[in-house]
Image (cartoon, rainbow, N blue to C red):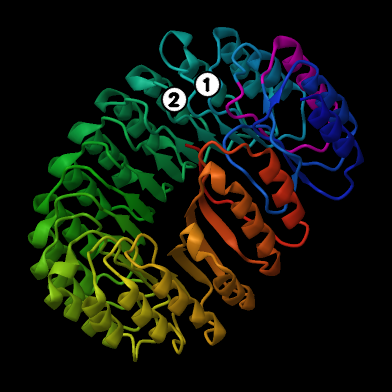
């Protein structure tokens, strides 16, 4: 697309104030990279350059259309030369560009470049030469602090982990390394683990989704005993098993630097959780622990609860999607009655029934530290007594800020009970009622409450059963409520009529998150909606589902809109 290249090049040469340039997802043939490279050599303003495929970005970014760079070897050479000469660029994103045979030229730049601090080359699939060059470059480079190598299949015969491991032993600048989805397996994990024993700069390491088992994690665990700089470790979506969890637990008893640990979906079971829990009684550094979907039940929960009674540092605990049941919840509740440090607790999809809900509710009468409680997808709507228990807690507890009740089949009568507990509550700021059974009557009730509410700032209501009537009632809230800052709702395209738009436009403080499904024949309507939004500086369009619409015109329209406002496209799905 020659015209886009010319426009991009001219703009890059002339840009005097914008520090971020985002170019994504439009086929540029041979010659386009060359033009871009020439401009980049001259430009002294742009510090962040995004050349990847997947998502739109608008906020604080000069949008030039969408650019997908299909690199050839000559292209990579040109860009590499430009990066050596450019003295301003600090952030470079090259995700999803099919760079396999050009990565050698790109990473070689790191030997000479002295400004680049962040490099993202996700999903480009290195060849052997590229991996070797990356290892050499990381040894020499002294400025790069963050490197993202997600989904490049570095493991196996290519020997990526070995090259990276050797580089980490000598590198003195890298602080964050992401190696998720790379088929590292046990052998690769051993290489990385050995490097961690001597590396003293890396603080964040992501090894998720790499088929790492007990043997590999043993070396990583041994490294953590000696390493004093790693603060964040992500080992989620591996096959650690209870043996792997035991190795991590051994490290936690001694390590005093790790503050964030992710073991989601790692098959640790009750035995693994028991080992982790025992280590928490001695650990004094861990603040965040994520153990979602690990096949443990009330036995493991009992051990974890005992640890919470002694541990004084953990502030975030996520044990969602495990089979705690009532017995496990009761044990956790006992710990909450004495624990004064835990601030966020996530218990979604944990098979907790009425006895467990009652115990948790009662524990909050004594607890004054918990700020966030997630009770999502526990079928609370089928048990009115559970709702009464929660309402009673809200009447007395004055510390809880965030209550998450998504997916609980709550209907109007349940919400009426729940909101009755909020009448004298002055602490709850965020309420998540997404994916429940709220129809128009339910939404009308919520609207009537919010009109005079003085505390709730965030309410999440998408994926319920309401329609136009309920939405119109809810949007009248904006006329009187000046506290609400974040509202999540479903808006069908036909419901965005002039009257509703007018009501949205009146409130200048609201972040309105809407979810729309736009078919190709409705694209003109979508564009007019975007232009309308010029009147609200804080509108956020979230979850744009487009169908087979060409985005050429959409980009032009949104460019016009962004001259007067800032739009954040949070998530887009192209079907």
What residue is rendered at 18% in x and 69% in y? 381
x, y percentage for residue 451? 46, 86
* Residue 374 in sight: yes
Q: Quadrant of the N terminus?
A: top right
In contact (CB < 8 Å): disc 1 and disc 2: yes
Disc tally is 2
Mark 1 or mark 2, earlier in chain: 1
Q: Inspect the magenta stretch and tell me whether residue 83 lies in it.
A: yes
Relative to 137, residue 288 above or below: below
Q: What residue did someone put label 1 on? A: 164
Q: What residue did someone put label 2 on? A: 192
Label 1 environment density (alpha carbons within 10 Å; few <14, some 14–19, many ≥20): many
Please state if 64 lies on the left or on the right of 379 as rendered: right
Q: The magenta stretch spans which residues?
A: 70-97
Label 2 environment density (alpha carbons within 10 Å; few <14, some 14–19, many ≥20): many
Res 466 quadrant in image: bottom left
Res 242 quadrant in image: top left
Q: Nearer the viewer, residue 562 or 486?
A: 562
Tag 1, which secondary structure? helix
x, y percentage for residue 88? 82, 38
């Amino acid at each position: 697309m020659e015209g886009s290249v010319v426009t991009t090049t001219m703009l890059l040469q002339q840009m005097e104030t914008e520090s971020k340039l985002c170019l994504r997802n439009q086929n540029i043939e041979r010659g386009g990279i060359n033009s871009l490279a020439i401009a980049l050599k001259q430009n002294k303003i742009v510090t962040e350059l995004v050349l990847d495929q997947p998502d739109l970005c608008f906020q604080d970014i000069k949008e030039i259309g969408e650019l997908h760079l299909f690199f050839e070897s000559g292209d990579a050479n040109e860009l590499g030369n430009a990066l050596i000469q450019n003295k301003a660029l600090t952030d470079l994103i090259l995700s999803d560009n099919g760079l396999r045979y050009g990565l050698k030229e790109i990473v070689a730049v790191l030997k000479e470049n002295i400004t680049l601090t962040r490099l993202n080359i996700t999903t480009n699939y290195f060849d052997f030469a590229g991996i070797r060059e990356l290892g050499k470059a990381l040894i020499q480079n002294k400025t790069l602090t963050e490197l993202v190598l997600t989904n490049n299949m570095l493991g196996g015969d290519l020997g990526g982990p070995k090259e990276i491991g050797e580089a980490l032993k000598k590198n003195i600048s890298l602080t964050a390394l992401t190696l998720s989805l790379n088929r590292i397996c046990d052998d690769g994990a051993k290489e990385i683990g050995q490097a961690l024993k001597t590396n003293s700069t890396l603080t964040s390491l992501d090894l998720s989704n790499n088929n790492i088992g007990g043997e590999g994690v043993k070396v990583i665990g041994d490294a953590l005993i000696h390493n004093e700089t790693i603060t964040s470790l992500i080992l989620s979506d591996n096959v650690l098993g209870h043996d792997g969890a035991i190795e991590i637990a051994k490290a936690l008893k001694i390590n005093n630097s790790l503050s964030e640990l992710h073991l989601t979906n790692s098959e640790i079971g009750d035995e693994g959780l028991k080992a982790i829990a025992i280590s928490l009684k001695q650990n004094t550094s861990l603040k965040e622990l994520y153990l979602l979907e690990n096949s443990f039940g009330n036995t493991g929960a009992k051990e974890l609860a005992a640890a919470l009674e002694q541990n004084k540092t953990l502030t975030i605990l996520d044990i969602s999607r495990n089979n705690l049941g009532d017995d496990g919840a009761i044990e956790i509740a006992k710990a909450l009655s004495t624990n004064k440090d835990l601030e966020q607790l996530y218990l979604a999809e944990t098979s907790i029934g009425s006895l467990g809900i009652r115990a948790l509710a009662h524990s909050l009468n004594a607890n004054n530290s918990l700020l966030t409680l997630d009770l999502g997808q526990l079928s609370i709507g089928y048990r009115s007594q559970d709702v009464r228990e929660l309402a009673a807690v809200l009447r007395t507890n004055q510390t809880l800020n965030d209550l998450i009740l998504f997916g609980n089949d709550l209907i109007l009568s349940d919400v009426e009970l729940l909101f009755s507990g909020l009448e004298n509550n002055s602490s709850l700021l965020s309420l998540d009622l997404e994916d429940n059974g709220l129809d128009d009557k339910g939404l009308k009730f919520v609207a009537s409450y919010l009109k005079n509410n003085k505390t709730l700032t965030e309410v999440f209501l998408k994926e319920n059963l309401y329609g136009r009537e309920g939405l119109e009632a809810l949007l009248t809230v904006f006329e009187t409520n000046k506290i609400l800052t974040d509202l999540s709702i479903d808006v069908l395209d036909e419901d965005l009529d002039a009257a509703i738009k007018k009501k949205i436009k009146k409130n200048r403080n609201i972040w309105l998150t809407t979810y729309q499904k736009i078919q190709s024949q409705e694209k003109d309507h979508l564009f007019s909606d975007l232009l309308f939004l010029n009147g609200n500086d804080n509108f956020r369009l979230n979850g744009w589902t487009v169908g087979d619409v060409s985005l050429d015109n959409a980009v032009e329209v949104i460019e016009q809109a962004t001259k007067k406002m800032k739009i954040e496209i949070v998530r887009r799905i192209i079907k």
